[in-house]
Image: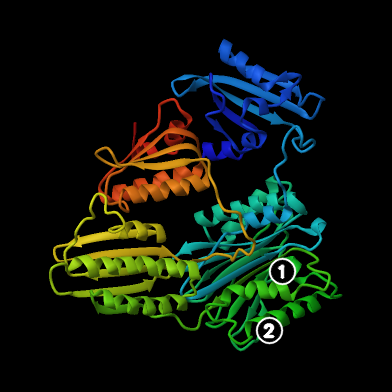
């Protein structure tokens, strides 16, 4: 997406309107430099604001190349291109330095960390399937200079299949993290087109042959059917995964030797097959897990087998509320007294011996029945291995659906029947259905503190479908289950320069947004849109006239609300001035077909 590319570009990019004291839009690099006119530096002895004013005055493009700063600094290029901004004269300003890191007083350096770079490129969550428990861990080498490009990933392929991947990019530090990122992206793209091991390895081989920093990387790639245990796999220069049986017996998969990626063009890929028994566990790992003082490779593999067996056979280790710790425990086990000598990535796939039966409750739609629903549903959800945050969210959403039925469905008559059903499909999609046989009453236009059940539900689950029938109402809630890693470090409270308010004076509510709509501002906008539309059941308009930055997160919010409106039979109206950058971002994002742009 153009907006996302501009936002994260290494050059400082400003969109300036003539006569304004600050830009109408600036990307992340520009905001670090400062958006006030006095914050803009000097290029080749000319202040940036002077070049900008000249371009605005003459209407002709300006380009300046030379040292950055008054005392001479890294070479820089300044480009100013006049353009229309909010129906008036303006300009696009791009300031790029050839060596931005040489002088932080001239060009602020983005805080950099090898660990942050690598952790940010690992998967933020793992699929949670009914037949399979996945656990992943990445531990950076204790010595910064030894930190490399080890990584793991999973890709849900549908029909209960999941791709399991562990790899090791050549090199150390941020360059290795970049190589890992490109390799992971190429893998995901290939797997979604054709997930077979032969096709993915061939694609990665061709990709690595064209990228110097990816050439020589090792990878193991397998596709596991969670229901049957059927595993097809291939590897390039990577150690074989470990299989730990339910009885603690261990063996390594047979992996035919093959050169690392890109090393030998047109190298054939041998695809192997294995059936993972119920109760067995597959342990994928990077080279760092078997590096260390052991003189022989067999000794290192034996050590890893012993550690994995001890972890997996420990009392309670495979219980659903502890299985997310398996990979970390194995990675901790291979740590030497001096720390991790190399990066260690571990991915664990445990095939469950028992699967959980669907839940079905037949109740009377009475408020007194709700505590019992919460207790039984909460226990059932815990058995799936859901994290506490997701579990509580589902329970609250289901509680709202049940409360609506208990309070409104049979108003004026004796409470009638209500049912709650919950189940998970092979791809880990949870579906909870709440049904009554009463009469649906749409919410009031301004219900105050009540009547916001749909709003709450839509904030807590992925999908909410309301089905009105001749006799009764059905609410269907869906959520794709996933296991997110625990975050130990405390994060500062989020803040945003955006202002979001709801104007209810007109015929329909209008959510007005101004300022820079970053990720946090986008979340505030989403909440206000859901609130103003009563959870998507009523029409609402979005006014973006005062927006100076419209991030990709904000685009996703507009898309989500537009889809809800489409499903409910109304169309979102968005006010964004023609010629402005916000209107441009919405148009290139393809939202014109889903919303009414005015």
In the rendered image, which quarter is residue 451 located in? bottom left
Label 1's element? loop
Q: Which mark is residue 428?
A: none
Between residue 440 and residue 485, name the one nearer to us. 440
Q: Which mark is residue 310?
A: 2
Answer yes or no: is residue 439 visible. yes
Q: Is residue 33 left or right of residue 449?
A: right
Residue appearing at x 27%, y 74% in the figure: 367
Outermost top residue: 58
Q: Position of residue 95 (x, y in %)?
A: 66, 28
- The residue identified by callout 1 is 239
Between residue 265 and residue 7, name the one nearer to us. 7
Give the distance between the C-alpha atoms of the residues marked 2 and 1, in whole angstroms: 21 Å
Answer yes or no: is residue 263 visible. no
Q: Is residue 97 left or right of residue 438?
A: right
Q: Is residue 365 left or right of residue 247?
A: left
Q: Position of residue 298 (x, y in %)?
A: 79, 78
Residue appearing at x 30%, y 66% in the figure: 401
Q: Position of residue 200 (x, y in %)?
A: 58, 57
Residue appearing at x 74%, y 35% in the figure: 100
- Quadrant of the image containing the C terminus: top left
Between residue 491 and residue 275, name the one nearer to us. 491
Q: Is residue 267 above or below residue 592?
A: below
Q: Earlier in the sequence, mark 2 or mark 1?
A: 1
Specify how the rendered protein is coloured: rainbow
In the rendered image, which quarter is residue 15 located in? top right
Q: Is residue 22 left or right of residue 175?
A: left
- For the image, the number of numbered tags is 2
Outermost front residue: 448
Label 2's element? helix
């Amino acid at each position: 997406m153009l907006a996302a590319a501009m936002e994260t570009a290494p050059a400082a990019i400003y969109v300036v309107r003539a006569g304004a004291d600050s830009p109408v839009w600036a990307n992340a690099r520009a905001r670090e430099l400062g958006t006030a006119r006095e914050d803009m530096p000097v290029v080749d002895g000319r202040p940036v604001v002077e070049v900008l004013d000249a371009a605005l005055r003459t209407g002709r493009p300006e380009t300046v190349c030379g040292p950055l700063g008054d005392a001479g600094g890294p070479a820089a290029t300044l480009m100013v291109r006049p353009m229309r901004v909010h129906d008036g004269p303006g300009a696009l300003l791009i300031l790029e330095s050839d060596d931005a890191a040489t002088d932080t007083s001239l060009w602020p350096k983005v805080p950099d960390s090898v660990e942050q770079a690598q952790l940010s490129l690992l998967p933020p969550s793992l699929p949670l399937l009914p037949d399979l428990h996945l656990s992943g861990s990445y531990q950076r080498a204790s010595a910064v200079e030894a930190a490399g490009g080890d990584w793991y990933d999973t890709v849900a392929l549908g029909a209960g299949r999941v791709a399991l991947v562990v790899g090791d990019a050549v090199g150390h530090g941020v360059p290795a993290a970049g190589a890992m990122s490109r390799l992971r992206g190429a893998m995901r793209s290939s797997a979604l087109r054709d997930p077979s091991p032969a096709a993915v390895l061939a694609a990665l081989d061709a990709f690595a042959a064209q990228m110097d920093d990816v050439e020589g990387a090792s990878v193991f790639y397998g596709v596991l059917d969670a229901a049957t245990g059927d595993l097809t796999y291939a590897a390039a220069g990577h150690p074989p995964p470990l299989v730990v049986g339910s009885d603690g017996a261990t063996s390594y998969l047979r992996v035919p030797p093959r050169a690392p990626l890109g090393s030998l063009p047109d190298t054939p890929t041998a695809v192997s097959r294995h059936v993972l028994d119920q109760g067995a566990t597959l342990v994928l790992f990077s080279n760092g897990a078997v590096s260390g003082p052991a003189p022989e490779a067999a000794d290192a593999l034996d050590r890893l087998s012993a550690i994995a067996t001890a972890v997996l056979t420990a009392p309670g280790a495979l219980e659903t509320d502890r299985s997310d710790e398996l990979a970390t425990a194995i990675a901790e086990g291979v740590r030497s007294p001096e720390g991790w000598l190399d990066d260690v990535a571990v991915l664990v796939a445990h095939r469950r011996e028992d699967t959980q039966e669907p839940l079905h409750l037949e109740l009377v739609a009475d408020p007194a029945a709700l505590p019992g629903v919460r207790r039984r549903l909460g226990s059932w959800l815990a058995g799936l291995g859901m994290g506490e945050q997701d579990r509580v969210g589902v329970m609250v959403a289901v509680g709202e659906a049940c409360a609506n039925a208990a309070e409104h469905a049979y108003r004026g008559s004796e409470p009638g029947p209500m049912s709650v059903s919950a189940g998970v499909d092979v791809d880990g999609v949870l579906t909870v259905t709440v049904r009554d046989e009463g009469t649906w009453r749409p919410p009031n236009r301004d219900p105050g503190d009540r009547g916001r059940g749909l709003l709450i539900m839509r904030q807590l689950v992925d999908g909410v479908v309301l089905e009105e029938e001749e006799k009764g109402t059905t609410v269907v809630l869906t959520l794709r289950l996933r296991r997110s890693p625990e975050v130990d470090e405390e994060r500062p409270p989020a803040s945003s320069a955006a202002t979001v308010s709801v104007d209810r004076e007109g015929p329909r509510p209008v959510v007005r947004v101004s300022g820079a709509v970053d990720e946090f501002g986008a979340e505030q906008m989403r909440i206000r849109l859901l609130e103003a539309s009563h959870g998507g059941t009523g029409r609402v308009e979005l006014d973006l006239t005062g927006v100076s930055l419209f991030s990709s997160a904000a685009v996703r919010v507009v898309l989500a609300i537009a889809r809800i409106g489409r499903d409910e039979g109304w169309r979102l109206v968005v006010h964004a001035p023609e010629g402005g950058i916000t209107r441009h971002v919405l148009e290139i994002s393809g939202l014109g077909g889903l919303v009414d742009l005015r």
